[in-house]
Image (cartoon, helix red, strand yellow):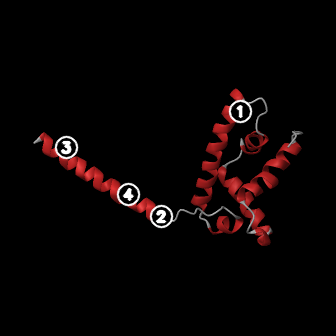
Amino acid sequence: MNGRRSATALIVAVGLFVLTAGGLLAADPVMPEITGAVWMKSSQQEKLAFLVGASSVVAIEHHIDLKEADDPSKFTEGWVAAFKDKKWAEIVDKIDAYFAANPDKGDKLVMDVVWKELILPTMVAKGAKP
């Protein structure tokens, strides 16, 4: 009976793998760049998820820089300085405000806006070199 359960479990596992892999292969492999046009069509939850994901990558990079880099990344240092006391919703609002005020910049990447409009001004205000 144990052998039969193992065989059944194996068949089910292989079946699920095949179904999942087929779905992954059928998925559109092209991810859209997150431009202002994409950003402004995104839900609040999607915007927050984007920022949390980006922040997770930046946090990992920043911790690696602190331990190993002779010349830490200006971007990660700037991100930490600009956003350490901010709520995610505040950052979303600032990005939204930029694209609302600049409707002709819909092709601009959101991370470019984050760098040039949010991080750099904070660095300059704090006397850091960008």
Where is residue 107 shown, x and y percent of the image?
73, 68
Of the two numbered discs 2 and 4 on the same chain, state the one appearing first in sequence. Answer: 4
Corner quadrant of residue 130: top right
Which residue is label 4 attached to? 20
Give the class, few, some or many, for how many residues have Cα within 10 Å of label 2's Cα (few <14, many ≥20): few
In this view of the protein, which residue sits in the foreground, 86 or 48?
Answer: 48
Where is residue 37 shown, x and y percent of the image?
69, 69
Mark 1 vs mark 2: in front: 2
Which residue is label 2 attached to? 27
In this view of the protein, which residue sits in the foreground, 82 or 107?
Answer: 107
Of the two numbered discs 1 and 3 on the same chain, state the one appearing first in sequence. Answer: 3
Where is residue 102 shown, x and y percent of the image?
80, 68
Mark 4 vs mark 1: in front: 4
Q: Considering the numbered disc 1 on the image, is that residue within a helix, a strand or a loop? A: helix
Measured Cα–Cα span from mark 2 to mark 3: 31 Å
Of the two numbered discs 1 and 2 on the same chain, state the one appearing first in sequence. Answer: 2
Q: Which mark is residue 65?
A: 1
Q: Residue furthest bottom?
A: 104
